[in-house]
Image (cartoon, helix red, strand yellow):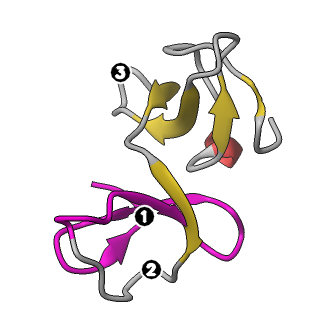
Amino acid sequence: MPTGSVAAEGSPCLESEARSFGTAADGTSLVCVFLGADAGHRWVRHAEDDDSVHTIGEPCDSSVDRVSRDRQGRAILCGGTTWTAGP
């Protein structure tokens, strides 16, 4: 599913969609994440995306940074002091 497509919260998504953004029918922003072997990849809500672009490993400030995008438009998280692909 391309970034910005309609997705349903909690519904399955493909491994190839991991870290992609989607939008629920009610406008809620979602991201495809891997929830473990039992649940697989699912669309879930995420913290506010500031629409900035960063590179995994770059410094971030977890007191203000939450979710951003990498150069490919995929979701990345501020993991304390650096941008990471996930928790």
Q: Is residue 23 above or below residue 18?
A: above
Which residue corresponds to mark 1? 85
Q: Secondary structure at mark 3?
A: loop
Residues at badges 2 and 1 in contact (C-beta under 8 Å)? yes
x, y (%) of residue 77? 37, 61
Q: Secondary structure at mark 1?
A: loop
Which residue corresponds to mark 3? 38
Q: Residue at x 49, y 52 (%)?
A: 49
Q: Is residue 29 visible?
A: yes
Numbered badge on residue 43: none
Which residue corresponds to mark 2? 56
Q: Residue at x 28, y 80 (%)?
A: 82
Question: What amino acid type is highlighted by mark number 3?
Answer: Asp
Residue 50 lies within the magenta run: no
x, y (%) of residue 48? 43, 45
- Span highlighted in magenta in the image: 62-87
